[in-house]
Image (tube, rainbow, N blue to C red):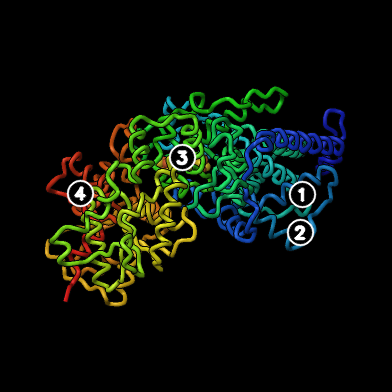
Amino acid sequence: MVEGVRPPALATYWLIQGRILFMVIPFLGSALFAYIVARRLTPLIRAQRDFRFDRPLIRLARVLRFWLGQWRHPRYRFAGTMHILIFAGFILLATRAFTLLVQGISPNFVMPGLAGEAGRMYGIITDYAATVVFFCMVIAVIRRAVFTPARYAVLARYGKGHPVDAIFLLALIAILMLADSLFLASKAAADAQQGQSAEFLAALSLPWMLKGALASTSMAKLQTLYLGAFLSHELTFFFLLCYRPFGIQFHVETSLFSIYFAKLDREILKPVRWGVADEHLDRVKSFGVKSFEDFTWKHMLDFYSCADCGRCSDNCPSNAVGRPLSPRFLSIKARDYAFQHYPVFSSSRTGNGKPLIGSIYSEDEVWSCTTCGACEEECPLLVEYIDKIVDLRRGLIDDGNVPQSLQKPLKALESRGNPYGKMEKKRADWAKAAEFQQLCHVKNLDKSDGAETLYFVDSITSYDDRMQSIGRATAKILDHIGENFGILGAAEKDSGHEVRRFGEEMLFMALREHNVGAIKNSGVQRIVTADPHAYNALKHDYKDVPPVDHISQVIAREVKTGKIRFNPVEEDRVYTYHDPCYLGRHNQVYDDPRDVLDAIPGLKRVEMTRCRDRSFCCGGGGLMLFYEPKEDQRMGVKRVQMAAEAGANVIVTACPFCMVNIEDAIKVAGLEGKMIAIDLAELVDQQMARA
Ligand code: SF4
Ligand code: SF4
């Protein structure tokens, strides 16, 4: 009969003493892991600079929230809960795994602080942790292999997904948990058979169940299982460690860093080159990203960190309407590229300087993005997309690859300061309608009348016949609340918001310089605009200009002070509010427009399923109006259908570009006469109680 079970350190495996074997495996495993990671870091070292070392306390707080706290995971309830359980299990089991590794060398090792009752408690917790992780892995494997969520699907145009890799890794983690539990269970079963006091195993946990199953197993078999489980745990642990950097589970290692270094000011675009001031941009030889090595190191780290969960693409409006863009695959393709061109086990590097457009990305893919930010809002690992896409566009523009339909508006912006090519002197014509002038006088600050507030109109509201009504409504609201305001008139040029996001940095800088000069000359103390794109540009892209408000914020404030009161709505309609991306997601103005709507007596409001930070882009503003993407359906049409599903027949928005897209979509969707769109400013002007 075997006298108890021998610990792995004192056992012999194929003539090798356990202690030696379990010294060699961790040493080789750790050394190989260090080598692999060092190789994976090679492209990051060759990448462009990126300044991510500022504000360490804020970054640490974000690590606690998004990494340790798994903040974004519950947005997908089932998958998110599973991930939180697995992550918590890993954190709890880390100490147990370390203890096991040391016990391979020193059998009586106990983690300091975990002797006695504390160790017993920790044992119970980790028994349950291993059980939960094991069953989560089983569910995850079944989910990946059998009940695959639609968001994991891979269209042929994006290349290949990595389902086998995902399933293999999930199975390995399940094996790790099983080995860990079997190790404890076989020891406990042997101790029990020998009448020794066995280690307490948490009731109904995996080790507890296994111990029950092994109750009548012979001591010799228990010894084999005990040693085999330990060896399996050790080998699986180090195999996983070294295998993860070859696939989607590399995020286990990189996510903490990519969250720590994630962009803090999401609404501000990255500069053309970190460390090169705007006034020195003429010294930069090549703009944007053309080859893989033009990405910054943080953007490459993002590629490694993407967990291939598909949440970004699931929320991407371009992907939803069949445009050739899926943000998830921007990362996956770049990671595959990095793995192929910077191999771990070969000294050949074949990636240097090859153009990405035409090899892994297409031009249409890069132009299809509306910069709506839905992908970034959703990603649990804070992977960034807008900066990368804008950088790829900068590269295209730098090489003269401007889409045909955008060439004219860009030229017009250069020569006339607006994308329509209209005369500068006609910019203030919207305010000259006789009927309007009887109600409200708009000062033209270009003609030296002073004012405290500037109403920055921007191009679409100035020149588009339909949108001019938003301009007039905004002016009437400002007039009603007694604001001393004026416009720049011919001295205003396009804010350049979309120009910048289309990658034309130099043109944007020229527009900005002109507008900043005009704003400073006007002597105003604050700015109001009804255009979220202008709002975002003035607030984040411009420097040294007075504070800026969107008109919805002004109205919400004045509703609270009582300066704005409303007449009840008369028609029995159902309203829904569509969040413009650059007001909502990019600037977190979600409540003010809703508060205004809710202050109108008798107004019935419903929410669309996709609202607030999950709002669905209308199709993109600015120059997107001039771009003709390949798509199966218009985004606006999808949005209008969402409003209809919510039971609404009035879509309220707070952006002239949303208005263009939504009104157009109502016609295309065949809902004319059943559904209308109105801007918040127009609705307020219509319902405002005047003395
Ligand atoms: S970028 Fe983020 S959301 Fe998109 S697939 Fe990767 S991890 Fe998921
Ligand atoms: S910013 Fe919007 S359109 Fe662009 S990739 Fe992200 S979700 Fe898609």
Q: Nearer the viewer, residue 369 or 401?
A: 401
Q: Are marks 4 and 2 in contact (CB under 8 Å)?
A: no
Spatial separation of the CA atoms under disc 3 and disc 1: 53 Å
At 46% from the left edge and 40% from the top edge, which residue is drawn? Answer: 503
Mark in the foreground, 4 or 2? 4
The quadrant of the rendering that contains the C terminus is bottom left
- Element type at marker 4? loop
Which residue type carries mark 4? Asp
Spatial separation of the CA atoms under disc 2 and disc 3: 57 Å
Callout 2: CB less than 8 Å from ligand 1: no
Which residue type carries mark 1? Thr
The part of the image, by quadrant, that contains residue 228 is top right
In the image, taking residue 4 as reference, residue 557 lies left or right, namely: left
In the image, taking residue 118 as reference, residue 325 lies left or right, namely: left
Which residue type carries mark 3? Gly
Mark in the foreground, 2 or 3? 3
At 21% from the left edge and 46% from the top edge, which residue is drawn? Answer: 663
Q: Which mark is residue 503?
A: 3
Q: Which residue is mark 1?
A: 99
Pointer 4 or 2: first along the chain? 2
Q: Nearer the viewer, residue 170 or 76?
A: 76
Q: Which residue is mark 2?
A: 114
